[in-house]
Each structure stands twice: as structure tokens, then as C-alpha cells.
Image: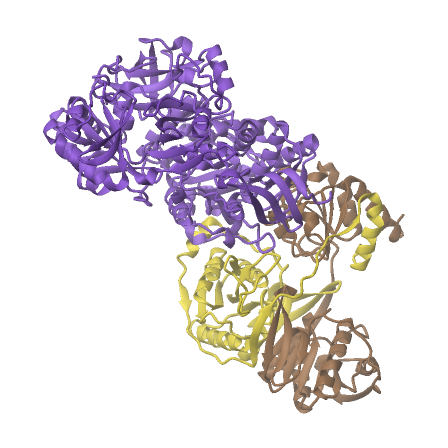
Chain colours: A yellow, B brown, C purple
Amino acid sequence: MRILVCVKRVPAPGAKILVTEDGQDVDAAHLGFTTSPHEECALEEAVQIAEREGGEVTVLTLGEAAAEEQLRYAASVGAHNAVLIPTDGEPWDPQRTARAISQAITDLEAADGAFDLILFGNESADSGGFQVGVRCAYALGRPIVNGIKGIEFADGVASARREIDGGYEVYEVPLPAVFGVKEGINLPRYPTMKGRLASKKVEVASMELQADSGGLARVRLHRPEEQVSETVILGTGADAAGAVCDLLEELGVL
Amino acid sequence: MTLLVVLEHDRGDLADASLEALTAGRGLAAANGWPMHAVIVGANGENLASDAAKYGAEVSHVVGHDMLVDFGPEAWGESVAQLARSIDAGAVMASGTERGNEVLAQIAARLDEPFVANCVTVTPGDPWEITRVQWGGSLLEDTTLVAGMKLLTYGHHSLEPSPADSAGDGSTIAFTPELDATLARTIVQDRTVLTKGVTLATAPVVVSGGRGVGSAEGFGPLEELAELLGGRVGCSRAVTNNGWRPHSDQVGQTGTRIAPEIYIATGISGAIQHWVGAMASKNILAINTDAEANMVVKAGHAVIADLHQVVPAIIDEVKKRKGLA
Amino acid sequence: MSEFPTRANVVVIGAGIVGNCLVGHLAELGWTDMVLLDKGPLPNPGGSTGHASNFIFPVDHNKEMALLGVQSANQYRDMNLSVDSGGIEVARTQERMDELQRRMTSAKAWGVEAQLLTPTEVKELVPFINEEVILGGFYCPSVSVVDSLETGTVMRKLAIEKTGLQVFANTEVLDLETTDAPNGATKISAVVTDKGTIEAEYVVIACGVWANKVAMMAGATIPLVPAVHQMADVGPMDVLAETNNEIGYPIVRDMDTFCYERQSAGSMEVGSYAHRPILHHPDEIPSNEEAALSPTEMPFTPDDFDDQMEQAIELMDMLGDAEIKYAINGLLSLTPDAMPCLGETTEVRNLWSAAAVWVKEGPGMAQVVAEWMTYGYPRVIDAHGADIARFYAAERGDDHIWARAEEHFNKTYGIVHPAEQWEGRRDLVKSPLYEREVALGAYFFQARVWERPQWYESNADLVERYGLSEREVEWDNRWWSPIIDAEHLNMRENVGMVDLSAFQIFELSGPGAIQFAEYLAVNKVDKPVGSSTYTPWLTPDGGFHSDLTMLRTGEDTVRIVTGAFDGGRDEFWIKKYLPEDESVTFANLTMSTCTIGLWGPKAPAVLGALTDIDLSQEGSKYGSLVNAEIAGIPCTLFRISYVGDTGWEIYTGWDNGVALWDALAEAGADHGIRPVGIGVYGGTGRMEKGYRLMGAELESEYNPVEAGLARPKVKAADFIGKEAYLAAREAGPAATACTFTVDDLTDSQGRQRYMQGGNEPILTLDGERIEDSHGRVSRVTSAAMGPSVGSYLLLGYLPTELAEVGAKFQVMYMNELFPITVAATSGSAFDPDDTRLKS
């Protein structure tokens, strides 16, 4: 099975996210970067599928040159090939991103054959646009379902599960197919030391692509009004049990 | 021009999220001087139109087709896209639920228009000025939108639904889209009920213990509480290091990262590596004797007391409320 | 939670291992009314303690670090928060194997059990090690792993229970306020936090990587920089998990790759000091809220760690298949000289520093600061090397701190020679004679900031003349030249001139100057104008704080001459004790004074050619000051000698230095004059005379009676440490400083070896360590050739009952034993009657 996973490089912030002075980006001066969590799960799922069903995993990202770090990370946990669509560092809007990725997939498939399965994350951790996967699938003429928390294969059909209240919806999607994967589908592995070292030898293919932006333009990012997050003390002894149960009922878990 | 609001329904009732969308849409339609129409896809459309009317929909478009009996993102997206085109809608919106965002993305792909997910405020004008959620709500983005047809979702829980001052008459217009048979490929085929054994990673409730539990046996009450709440037991690294629980129960950077509805952390100081595993929890209740403990400071709720007294009391109260005691 | 206080006697900032242990020790010493603050939560506020690897290797060549490491390890043990895991330093190279022999020597000195292991023996202890890549190991069974967070909690609770310490977590210090104090000083007055302002008598900065930032709020400096130490936690691995223990195998330090492997339950922590130095400004450290992990657990930069991974896998193959579950760029504190920053800040009275301290020495260093605050100087150990007052202004700026931290970071596991010189940040302060010295091929050593010629290549011809040669073993030859011995011999035969402009020269003046000078000094200063006093300055407990010369230059003026390594500490000591009535004015004359030493049998002849004054022993008495023109240049002649030949320290104005130097060189040409370096002045010449050196023989743990520097009588005037000094005289010495000759320098391979004065243990003929009744170990404090006595000389203390001339002992060097003999217990090995000084 030939599998493509599309991932995004995002900062790994703490509880409080700072914004640059011009409001155009997250202030990542002292932050590390990571793969957006849903996509990290998509990557793990792809690697597990390839290990189970046989095949090859290609990881693709669109971003600044430093996004090679996320491609190498993917390689360190089992991706075989890596593709970077370089940007100038400016954030690309969802339409521009989807156009470039669709073009890249078309080009990759023309060279090496079609992907049986393309996985996206359900949405990115930072901008949360909920659309790049759908746009790409539509452009490629392939089926896509989002929110996927389980994939199995039989006879060229992917059986994909999506969580709903109290259970799962099941989709039977013929391959080639596209899914938007959600965190919780698996527990992503960490790279091993040998994996990390091997990943340095994986060649990262660079695909220079241009695409037109859509009609969305960022004015600025800002922090919401400070929520005073004082801890609510429910009690100082066993008599707090009532207040605790009120809370549990309010949250719908009791 | 018209504002179309895509509704979701659940076993015959409009979803709360769609009431939010109608409430938000009503204001947006008024700001534009447009009428607000609702879109009801699939069966029972007529029954829901009157509810939509209460929230200000002048008309409900009831979209019917053999392939729309059950949910399918592509079929739904294609259908609403056709409707929107046919009535020359100025904007299509929904609530930012999983389905809402997915269907709007499908429409956006088909119409090659921008789509703005999880808006908080929308101000029409030239261009439209929008504030939307980023980073799961940690940041907001001000953005401008220029589009032939505006496509957006409102962030779920970003406002309280309220009925319109003057309800519509609940009139409906039927719409039958032309759907290619291939779109059947993404229609729900089956539903399964969640099996009982939830995992630590997916449990809605995690009851966790740290060094303060004191022993392997000390986890008995935590097990019982987790069981009562349909959850699982977790623990901190100090606990696995002491051999009180297996590593598979460890919550943290090097254990499992969890995101339950509520994380009940008992006797856990909240070391960073532990916090990283627990911080995605939607609510945190810390039970600790030390009011300055990191877990207490970071939690939304806390009980400052000995877990060995509080947890049994909570168990008794839960049993009482469940009618088990 | 208690109400936020508006007043406290002591506010300690930082609740890491240091701050917590400090409040615990202060409570035990009787301090009350204390507040402990931290901007983070408890028990882990997010500083370096929270991610420490928490192990202690007790062997270090440096005495302060070694003994405080042992002291700290014992404190952790006493709290039952420590496990003796054992530890092995493995060698991959022959050079490292030699270093392990040196480690064995230091282990012997500090009484730490240790043994060398073959690769096979290492594998018996660490079955998953690849013994084929190592040549051997240095095994120390008492290496321990501690719980630093819990220790902090225990110490904090001790202070709460004992003295009602108030603790405020999640409280950020926004400012430190000061008030004016006498003599133009400033004094701490309050700590401003986001929860309120606390007026405080004492404030201690114990907040690690943030220490300098906080100090600067008060106008003080704590010269340290946050630096990255990378580590990765990999696992789980069955062999480790099966131990069912936080640590079940010895810690392995892979010394040649600057890495360590430390079990942590089922995982292995791989830590490195091999990556490029990565330094941060404190403002770059995120807040607790902004940090993804904790403020000091910064994002891992894997590219910097790849080489270490390969080396780790080479050493332990199983690590390669383990998952990297947690990896950080952990921040710790580095200082310009790799030593901690302890003591009262020099800029602000009652503002103290307890910073640049790692977990391995935290409890001990906290004890040092607590005792220092209580008794005026630490008791547990001499801490001059960690005294924050040691830094000169040029060492306190970011440019210097960063450059030095970058240079020494990779030496954390390096093989560092006792005389090792810095590469960068040289030429910070140059003598007025610097150009002349460069022209003479001076080989410069840096004394803190001062460049001093150690020897002159222009004297290379003397090596042949005196039949000298290089040393056989490269290590002994490193940072040394036979020219030193040659300069020495020429000085003894003819005359030498020594640039002493690095002397730190202070002046006390005003109506209270003489009385104050008396208060500082053990020996009488109030003598006729033109007299000098060589004297110790004592700590309140009667140990050495300083050892220097005081010159009665006027009715109301005293000049103080001290060494380049001690200027900062001595200046601070003076300012700290300056009378509050402002009757004494302090001035630092260092940068306006040039000093040249002229010594040797022909020194009177050389100087006589340049001046009309009477240079006879009557006209220029030993120890006297005479103002004179030398070659028309106004100078002060001080007849004194630290090298054993007659002559003078000649003081003149900075700008006259070159003219004086040239005049002496010209006048001395026919007398065989040569420039002489500090190798003779501080080494061979001094050693032949048995003169003690501050920081070597002279430390606060020893008193003048033991050092052989007690005068027959005690002056009437009061002075710091007098009571303790009188008691020490009464009690008699427990130890006695001795000069030893090495009877045979030949090692087991037939090579001549030369001890470095690096704490080599002095042992009985049975090879046993020697401790005096106060538990102080006999060790080499100074070592140098005595070219004129024809023996290699050592200085060190012996228990007084063993200190007899002619007594035989052994010295251990590079883990081999060499026979030595006590040559002198007071006085000199060379010219014991000082006839040369009096001729």
C-alpha cells in the first residue's frame, strides 16, 4: 500500500501563547516545534498500516525550510520518503495550501504511481481551518471523511470509524481514499535513537510550487481577554463530596 | 441575497449547536439586511422547520434525496452547495461542530470559495471583518474575508442560543439535489455502540493517584470511583516507579497523554512531565493537602484535603445520586 | 494561606535545592522571621532543580567542590533521600586512563573509596556495556542518586516547623529596593513582588539561572549565565525495568564523549556536555505559563545531540532501539570560572548570593552560606574559591561571562590541568610594562584578569647555561618551562627584575585609618611612618581570610598590598568593615601604581647605580619604606623579598613604569640582570623560602599558629578574629605547615614525575591517609622545583605530632607513591638563616 501523510509544523507552546509584536504570528522565539497532534496520529496510523499491510509511507509538508525537522521526525518514526513544499515563511491560507498540496500529489503520483491512502490531520493545532484535506480530496476526485478514529482494510475498501456520542459511525470507503484522522486513534510512538540517526539519511525531496491565495487575509493574532483562572476550592474535607458531585453532574459524567 | 444556516439534527430534535448557529445567523442576516433561511438535510425536515422558525428562520429548505437518508459529508456538501448556488445565497453558515465544519469545508471545496471556521464575531462590510478561534481558543485571529459566497461556522459554545422576538411561520421549500452515485462512498454504513472497556487515552473520566496515595492498595477507592463514573485509573510517575501501578497507567510526558472531560488528580503534586500528559483535559479537579501544589494551582477546581478521606466520601455521594446506595 | 507579610528579617528568593536547604540550615542556626519566595509552584517551581539528573560523583580535584559534594551527599543520606548506586567513569583513550589515575589520587586525598576496573570488571557491574570500546573504568561505590525535590520539601518543612518560615509560591519578584548606607554604600531594604512588598533586613538570591537578573534589580551582579545541558530519556528497557528500582545499576560516565548514562526506573537518561555551548540570556527563559514543559526545560535541539546518540549506542547498543520519550535542553548555571557564586554581593550590603550551585553540592553550599551569614565566614570549609567577591569588574559583564562559559562548558568532563590557562578573554588588564614583556617573549599566565609573565623566552639561553632540560612526561611539562628554573638560578647568582604591577594596592586614609587598619590585621600596623607589616587578616573564627602587607605610608594613611587573586575579596572585606562614622576613606591605587621587584646578590649594585640614597642595610632596612629617585624617577623603595634574595619592591607611578624598567635593565646589563617571571616569584623562589601563599597553604580552615605565622606576642589592639586567635595560641597547633623534599621522583616506569601542587595526598609509609585531630587531610598545597637546593619541594600540613624535620612520608601522584622527607617545619629549605636577605 502506498500511503501519503500530510503534516504541519507548529510551535509547541505552554499554557500561555504569546504573539509577536506585529500580531502576525505566534512568538516562537523560545518555543520548540512539533507536528500538529492529529497529524502525528495520522503518521503513526500510516506507519502501522504499512507495517501491517506492507507498503511505503511518504510524508509531505508545506512550510518554511525548517519544517524539514518535522519530516525528519516522521522519518525517525518510520516514514520512508519525505517531501517539502517550501514557502517563503509567510503563512499560506487554506486555499493556497490545498492548491499546492493537490498539485504536489498529482505530480508525485504521475512519477511514482497513485497513493492508495492519503491521511491528513482533522485540523491543525494552530490555525484550525478544518479544510485543507477536504479541498485536496475534492481536487483529486477522491472520497474523504474527517474525524476518523479507526481504519481497517478489506478487499480494497477502507472501513473507517468516526466517534459519535456513545459509539461510532462506520464508513466503507473504496480505495484510493482520503481521511482526516483524529487524535486518540492510536498512541504515537516516539523515535528510537537508531530511528533518529537513520532519519538523517532520508533524502528530503523539495517541490517548488506556486499557488494563488484565496480571500482570507490575516489582520492580526491576539490573546483573548485574560480569563481569571483562579482555582475554585470546593472544600477542605470530606464534606466537599457534594460540591464535587455537583461538578460531575454539570459536566455530564455523572 | 440570503443567509443559509445548515442545521444538524439528532433523533428528531435540532442539535443545540444548530440553535446557536441560528441565533448567530439571525444577527448576521440582520446586519446584512438579508433574510435568514435554514437548510435541513434528510428526513423529518418538515418537523424541524417550526423549531428553526422560532429561532428566526424565515424559510426552511428541506433537502431530500435517496442518498441523504443518512449522513455523508460529500453528499451533504454537494447538496447544500447546489442549493446555495440555486438561491444565490450570500453566505452559508453552520455551527463549528465536527459535521458543521466538515460540511462547510465540502461546500467550500466545491465552490472554490474561502471557508472561515469557528468564528466568534462577524462584521459584514467590505471586506467582512471576522474574529475567529485559533489554538483551540488560546488565541483569536482577526481576519478579513473577500468571497463571492461567504462560508463560515460559528465556534460551538461561543454564544447562548435564544429564540427570535418574532418567529417565522415555519414554511418549507423542498429541494432535490442532483447527486452523482459515487458520492454514496462516504455515507454512514453502520453504527456501533461504544464498548464498555474504555482506554486511558479515551476515557471521559480519569481518576489518577500520585505519591500521596501511599501504596498499591491505596488505589482501591480510586478504582471504585473510576468504575462508577465510567472512567479509568491513571497515575503519576512516582507511582509506577514505586511499582504500585503498571506503566500503562502512567499519565504524563513519558506515559499516556489524556484529554478526558474531567481529570481527577488525587495526591499528585503536578510535576511538569505529569502535567504535560494531563493538560489537555477539559476540566481538572485536584485533591491535595497542599494548596500550593502545582496541580492545585493549575486545576479549575480543587479540594484541599486528604484524598483518603475525600475519595470515599465522593464515592458515597455518587452512589447516592445514582441510586445505588 | 497566611497573609502576605510586609516585613521580614530574611527573604530568600528561590525554592530550588539551594533556597530550600538554605532556609533549613538558617533555621537550624537559629534564624527566625524568614520568608521563602518562588515565582513557580511547589514542589517544583520550574528551575534547574526540577530537571536535575540528581547524581553525585564525590571525586573532584578541587577541594571545595569535592568536600562540599561529600558533605552534600551525606546530608541527602541523613534524610534518607539518597541511594548509593555506585558510578563508573569509563575511559576510551590512554590520556583518559592517565586521568583516571589522577582521579584515584584525588579519591585518596578526600578519603573516597574508589578502584580502577578492567573492561571486563566494568561489564560485570554494567552487563549491557560494550566493554570493547573502553580501556577501563574508575569505580566509586559511594556515587549516589538523590531526590532533590523531596529534600527541598523536607528542608523547607523543617524551617516551617522550627521557625515558622512563611512560604509563598507563585510569587514573582519584580524589584529589589535599596537604601543608602554609610561610606557611600547601598543596603538592601525591600523585595517587591506581585503579591506585595516585603521590607527585609537580609535578602538571599537563590534563584539559579535567574540570579543575575534579580541581582541587577538592586544594582548588584551575580556573574552567571543560563546554559544548556542536553539530556534524553530513552526507554523502557526490560533489563532496567526488571530492577524494579529508580536506579539498580551504577551510573556510567563516558568521559571521553562527555556523556553519561544514568538509569531512571525503566529508562536510561543520556546526558551530554559534548554539544556546542548553548547559552541564553535570562530574558529568553519563558515564564512557567509560557513554557511547554518548565521554564528551564527548553526545547530540545536534536541536531546538537546526534553525535552523542551514536556514541551512546556504541557504548550501550540497547539504547539504540529504545524510544526517546523525553528530551530537553535543560538549563543550568555557568560562571566565568566554573565555581559557584556564594556570599554577600559586593555592591549591596545584606544582599547575598547562593547561586550557580548544582544539586550535587546544593545542601553543602547552602550550609556554607547559612554559616557565612551567621558567623561572618563559613565554618564547614574554606570557600574562597566560591566567594562572589573574587570577581573583578571585568569578570562581571555578559561578554566575559558568556565567553568563559563557552570555553569551559565542554571541559565539564574534560581533562583540566591544574595550571590550565584560558584561551579567550585574555589581555583584559595589562601591566604598564606589557609591551616590553611581549618583546622579551613573555609567556603570560592570567591571574583572574591580569596578564603576568610566567617566564620569558628571551631567557632560553640560560637553560643551557645551567644544564636544565624539559620534563620527561608531557603532563608535567604542560604549562611549565625549564626557563623558570633558569631564571631562578640566574637571580640567585646575579639579579632579576620582576613585574609585580598586578599587585592590588589599596589605601586607607583619614583620622580613623590607623585604628581601622589595626582592626583588620593580626599584627601591629601602628608603627612609625615608613614601617611595614606583613600580616594575616583573620575571619571571626580565627582562620585566614587574607595574607598581605600593610605599609605605614603616613600619619593617617596605610597602604595595603595584596595579590592579584585576592584583590576582590580583600577590597570587599575592607569595605564591609569600614567604620560607620566615615572616618576612613578607601582608595584603590592599583591602576595608578607600577611595581617592579629587583632581587639578587647584585640588586644593591644595580640600584646603587641609579640613585644617591644609602642602600645599605642601615640606610634601607629590611621591611622599611624609603622614598627615592631612581634614574630621576620618583619611587618608593620597599626592602622586602618573597624570593629569598636581597632587594626591593619598587613602586612608581603607572606612567613611569617603562622608564624605570628600562633604567633597571640598562643598569643591570653588566650585572647579568634578567627579567624573571611569576614562575620564580610565586613558585621556585617562594618555595625554597617556605613562604606561605593565600589560597594554597593559607585558608580559613587553618590559623596562623598552624601556618607558622604567629608572632611571639599578641598586640593589645582589638582585631577581627582576636578571640579565636588567642584561643588557637592557647590550644597550640593541631597541624603544622611543612616543607618536604621529594626523595625520588622516579615512577614505576622509570620516569621522573613532578607533582603539581594539586592536592596530592601525603601518606604514611604504609600508604595510609593522614588526618589531623580536626579531620583535615594532609595534602600537597604547593609544589615546585627548588633549583638552588637541588630538590623538588612540596608544601603541606602534617598533624603537629608528626611534623618533625627528617620524618619520612610518601606522596601520591598519578596513583603512584613517591618517598618524601620533612625538610622544614618553619623557616626555609634554602638559606634558613636569611643571610642573603640581610647582606
Locate residue C354, reporting x and y percent: 53, 37
- Judging depth in this view, the residue of C351 and A217 nearest the camera is C351
Residue furthest left in the image: C670
The answer to whether C433 appears left or right of C716 in the picture is left
Where residue A63 appears, as percent x and y from the top left, is 48, 68
B139 sits left or right of B316 in the view: left
x 42%, y 32%: residue: C570
Relative side of C324 to C618, left or right = right
As rendered, which of A71 and C771 lies closer to the eye?
C771
Q: Is residue C478 visible?
A: no
Whether residue C508 is visible, yes or no, is yes
Image coordinates for residue C176, horizontal then vertical, percent: 57, 47
The residue at the point 50 percent across, 18 percent down is C724
Taking A163 as reference, is C829 above or below it? above
Tell me where residue C524 sits by quadrant.
top left
Identify the image quadrant of residue C471.
top left
Q: The N terminus of chain C is located in which quarter?
A: top right
Q: Is A111 positioned to the left or the right of C163 in the image?
A: left
Pick whichever, C33 or B103, lies toward us: C33
Measured along the vertical axis of the image, is residue B122 above or below residue C503? below
B265 vs B115: above or below: above
Q: Is residue C700 above or below residue B322?
A: above
Residue closest to the eye, C594 or C36: C594
What is the quadrant of the C terminus of chain C in the image?
Answer: top left
- Count the marks: how many? 0
The image position of residue A219, as x and y in percent, is 57, 75
